[in-house]
Amino acid sequence: MTTRNITTTTRKNTGRSNKAATPKTTRKPTKPTKRDISLLENSPEERWKVIAVAAYHKAEKRGFAPGDELQDWVEAEKEIDTLFFG
């Protein structure tokens, strides 16, 4: 009969949990601050960037299907202007 030597190793506690990562919660949109508004009022480029991001998210929600890019932009522009300028 053959005898086997079995060695065991122990794991170091790295402080990490084996639990699955919990998804991050989404933040509720907040009202723009006076600084945000003044940035947009004084910088057409900043306004354009904010609208571009909003239009991108609209396109993403509809799966980037072609043909509605202008509609995405117009809706985003209206939403941003309403949000920042009332």
Image (spheres, rainbow, N blue to C red):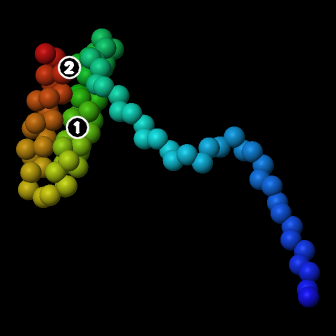
Question: Which mark, residue 82?
Answer: none
Q: Is residue 11 left or right of residue 5?
A: left
- Residue 76, how many percent across, how many down? 15, 35
**Which residue shows up at 11% across the image and 30% down it?**
78
Question: Which mark, residue 84?
Answer: 2
Q: Is residue 36 above or below residue 5?
A: above
Query: Image quadrant of residue 2?
Result: bottom right
- SS for callout 1: helix
Name, please, the residue furthest toward the front. Answer: 1
The total of numbered circles placed on residues is 2
Count neighbours of disc 2 (C-alpha within 10 A) and say few if under 14, some if 14 to 19, many if 20 or more. Answer: some
Query: Image quadrant of residue 37?
Result: top left
Q: Which residue is mark 1?
A: 54
On the question of residue 42 being in view, the answer is no
Q: Amino acid at mark 2?
A: Phe
- Residue 39, how many percent across, how many down? 30, 20
Count neighbours of disc 1 (C-alpha within 10 A) and say few if under 14, some if 14 to 19, many if 20 or more. Answer: some
**Between 22 and 28, which is closer to the camera in this rendering?**
22
Q: Is residue 36 left or right of residue 55?
A: right
On the question of residue 23 being in view, the answer is yes
- SS for callout 2: helix
**Which residue shows up at 80% across the image and 55% down it?**
10
Name the quadrant of the C terminus: top left
**Between 80 and 16, which is closer to the camera in this rendering?**
16
Q: Amino acid at mark 1?
A: Ala
